Amino acid sequence: MEIQIRRGDTLWSISNTFNVPLPLIIHSNPTANPNTLSIGQTIQIPGYRITTYTIKPGDSFYKIATKERISVDSLMLVNPGMVPTALQIGQQIRIPRRVTTTIIDPRQNYDSGILASDLEALATLYPFMRRRTIGNSVMGKDLIEVQIGNGERIVHWNGSFHANEWITTSVIMEFVNSYLLALTNNETIRGRAMLPFYDQVTLSVVPMVDPDGVDLVLNGPPEGNFGEEALDINGGSLDFSGWKANIRGVDLNNQFPAKWEVEAERKPKSPAPRDFPGYAPLTEPESIAMAELAGELSFEKMLAFHTQGEVIFWGFENLEPPRSRTIVNEFSRVSGYEPIRYVDSFAGYKDWFIQDFREPGFTVELGQGINPLPIGQFDEIYQKTLGIFLASMYM
């Protein structure tokens, strides 16, 4: 929602008028200098939308504000130039309405188009959420990272490294929306205030690492060469439910130079629906983008969300720092998931992150069953994962 600055307005006064924390106002307006606001300058107010209201007999700004549970000053701000004492029956005015519920629907087959649309809607409503493209998929789709927060500690989450594990994106996006909502409404999540997290942590999220693969699983092969090649790799079958790889049959979570040679020796030697690690490490644009992101941001900790098994893998070759054990034990306590330190599987993003950065890295396997997990498991998965999301920011 936009308002225009009046004489005497400050970002602090606007924060008080709309009851939105000042840091969210400041970060929603990165080009505005709080000390040199000018009359008529446009300012974004996060967490609000404009609706219209038709004046009825007996209405006044005070009566309308009382009914709508907003301040008279907020009405004045969204109706510049209007004279409150000269309202006319039938006249339309603007009403600022606080958004008090989540606006996205992750309980559906969540492909890259839905993700892009939802991120656009969230960025419009919550402009303090930063969005950028960190690279492109094989087919040229944007690999989107979002950042929320202003803290020095950078915590990273990612989902859908594997195509048929797309429900991880849905779960991540549900929390992203809930976090943004709680911040603008000064609410808690599981009894924890969210603004301290915002001040202390920068949350980096890549919700969908493999958009081409997710779309292939959910929507079938695209027209053209990419679709034809994927169909050939899949043995001519139109059932892509078992497909974990990117569009050209490379398993992105077997692409990282952390004992990659071991995986290459025992995994498929050519493109396949799953497990082919590529002809060399870091050949795919998606895995390259994720490696470059880690190098750029130097995450304090990293969580890669996969399915299934309700376990958390947290070690690699005894290179993980001692605090990883403390963190994973808290993850286990709040979720019921089982911590597993070592597993005979290498070349994953978690493995490489621990190896190269010596910081806590985790592969969190959501849910139980056979991939792709049905969306009917969403609520159960989310409730168990919610504690992990929160703990990753306070541990």
Image (tube, rainbow, N blue to C red):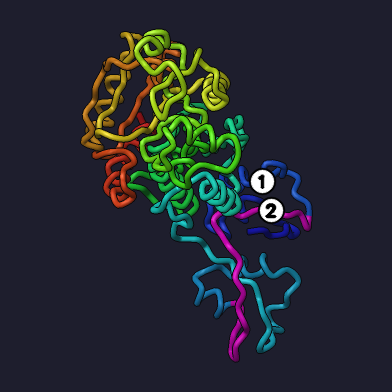
Judged from this view, the residue extending furthest toward the front is 236
Q: Residues within 10 Å of mark 2 (few under 14, many from 20)?
A: many
Residue at image point 40% right, 9% down = 259
Residue 23 position (above or below residue 94)? above
Q: Residues within 10 Å of mark 1 (few under 14, many from 20)?
A: some
Residue at the spot of label 1: 29
Q: Determine whether, in the image, residue 202 is placed left or right of residue 13.
A: left
In the image, is residue 341 part of the stretch drawn in magenta?
no
Q: Position of residue 351 (x, y in %)?
A: 39, 16
Q: Position of residue 233 (x, y in %)?
A: 46, 30
Instruction: Calculate the distance from the C-alpha at mark 2 to the C-alpha at mark 1.
Output: 6 Å
Q: Of helix, strand and loop, which one carries label 1?
A: loop
Question: Is any part of residue 202 visible from this angle?
Answer: no
2 or 1: tag closer to the N-terminus: 1
Numbered marks: total = 2
Front-most of 103 and 77? Answer: 103
User: Residue 223: which numbered mark, if any?
Assistant: none
Residue at image point 58% right, 66% down = 96
**What segment is highlighted magenta in the picture?**
39-61
Q: Of helix, strand and loop, which one carries label 2?
A: strand
Residue at image point 25% right, 33% down = 309
Q: Amino acid at mark 1?
A: Asn
Residue at the spot of label 2: 43
